[in-house]
Image (cartoon, rainbow, N blue to C red):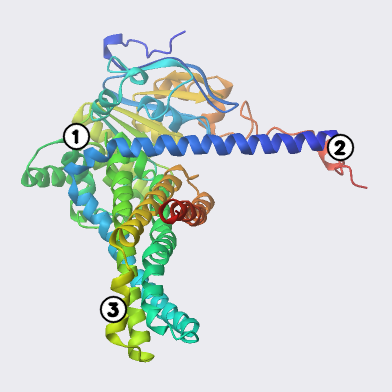
Amino acid sequence: MTDTPPGHHLSDTLIKIRGLHFSHGQHVIFDGIDMDIPRKGVTAIMGPSGTGKTTLLKLIGGQLKPGSGTVEVDGENVHRLGTAELYALRKRMGMMFQSGALLTDLNVFDNVAYPLREHTRLTEAMIRQLVLLKLNAVGLRGAAQLMPSQLSGGMARRVAMARAISLDPMMIMYDEPFTGQDPISMGVLVQLIRNLNNALDICSIVVSHDVRETLSIVDYAYIISAGRVIEHGSPDDLRASVSEWTRQFIDGLADGPVPFHYRARPLLEDLFDNGGRR
Amino acid sequence: MMNAVLERFRTIGHRTLSSIRRLGRGHLFLLNVISVLAGMMTRPGLLIKQMYSVGVLTLIIIVVAGLFVGMVMALQSYYALVDFGAEDSVSVMVVLSLLRELGPVVTGLLFAGRAGSALTAEIGLMKATEQLSGMEMMAVNPMQRVIAPRFLASFLSMPLLALIFSAVGVIGAYMVAVMLLGLDDGAFWSQAQAHVDVHLDIVNGIIKSAVFGFVAAWIAVFEGYDCIPTSEGLGQATTRTVVYSSLAILGLDFVLTALMFGD
């Protein structure tokens, strides 16, 4: 069954994922995932740590190749594209990494200007205006001359956001934007993601395991675990879900379908096994 | 018992395959770097910046080491030759040793320790902090913007640094032999001039240092790019850069010496 948001036309789909399989060695990360991510609005991809949420973003961005299955972005099969076509597609994608991934030898201004200088022939005066506008959108115009090492984690992510929107992309992927943030920074990032999406009218994909913050701003969400999509729907649908998996994740229960204990032998067997020693 | 033996064979096999795979990755990486070198010409600023970082900032250690190596060589040569009344040949011994061997080899070893390890650490840290991934997602090829300038700057810097090392070494030898030990100024220079062949000694020395520069640069950028992006992985990669580069330089020096100076 295709996991498509209800009332959603395929022409509205920006990203279409079908039968996606991906493994790291023997470890299966995705075991046949289907997803449709709309062209407009904020979509969340949630799931416990280690379920491959960041890997999914890398598959969408063409940084990893799947074992089988397809990922189509704006009608183009990402993993069939040549390098030039893939780079052309990436110019229309923005990505905010968990660490910010700012270039540490450039200041804030030059980091945001970097994609513009690489991919456009705009004059420096024009680039300056654009960069200041992007930085203003994330509230950091005053920090333009700071180096990345002088920024807090939240500020670095906001600069990364400004850089991600510098080429006016059709979509932005946010990788764990709220992890490790204090309540104020988190509130700022939550609002920024929503407001930027409203202002730019694009597709935003938020990968996160921060349930409350994420569900407060998204239009649609997928929950993945154990290599499969276990549930998807609007935030209200997910909050009302009776699925054991979804309940454990949303309510933050320590034990459930995702077990508290890592795979191991029975405790007694382990305790009384002296490893062959007397 | 049998299981332990089989396990030992399995480990050896696994390590061998892993080394061969790594060697293959290293060569593909090199091809990839070479294929983007031409595209780098549109951004000469990147190369100049790296030439400063890799070459100019390595100058101090090269100059100081060259000076002391030249001085020590002059002293040792003098003590060995004075018994035979051949102390006027001190300059010949020092200059030939510097141009043919010590210049390229010691510069290569110092370069691997100072610039090579720094390159590996820098690239590895860029990988660990997702800067390389970030560039890829901005449709910027990190091979072209990060790896190629560092590789080319290292390759071009090495022969220049080796020449500077040898030149400073000769000055050090002059200071000891002429100013300290009182050898004749004219004999020092004329003996050196008479016995140094431009092609055989100077050009071959430059070729050697260019080869060492190529290998040291390749190892340094590959180890950084291929490292496990953790603090432990980064430390191991930096160590590997220094060890592999040093061994490669010493091994290649033997091969090149046999090819260049053999009959």
Q: Do labels 2 and 1 share a chain?
A: no
Q: Which amino acid does label 2 sit on?
A: Met
Residue A95 shows in the view: no
Q: Which chain carries label 2?
A: B
| SS state under label 3 | helix
Q: Are marks 1 and 3 on the same chain?
A: no
- The residue pinned by badge 2 equals B1
**Mark 3 residue crowding within 10 angstroms, few (<14) / some (14–19) / many (20+):** some
Circles 2 and 3 in contact, beta carbons < 8 Å: no
What amino acid does circle 3 point to?
A: Trp
Of residues A30 and B148, which is closer to you in this image?
B148
Q: Classify B67 as above or below B144.
A: below
Position of A187 with respect to B242 (left or right) is left
In front: mark 1 or mark 3?
A: 3
Check if mark 2's residue and mark 1's residue have beta carbons within 8 Å.
no
In front here: B34 or A173?
B34
Tag 1 residue: A167
Number of residues whose C-alpha sits closer than 10 Å to that of mark 1, classed few (under 14), some (14–19) or many (20 or more): many
Q: Position of residue B145 (x, y in %)?
A: 27, 43
Q: Position of residue A275 (x, y in %)?
A: 85, 42
Q: Quadrant of residue B190?
A: bottom left
* Disc 2 secondary structure class: loop
For the view shown, which residue lies furthest in the right direction?
A278
Between A53 and B235, the residue placed more toward the observer is B235
Mark 1: which amino acid? Leu
- Of residue B227 and residue A139, the one placed in the foreground of this image is B227
Asked if B34 appears above or below B219 in the picture, the reply is above
Residue under label 3: B189
Alpha-carbon span between mark 2 and mark 3: 71 Å
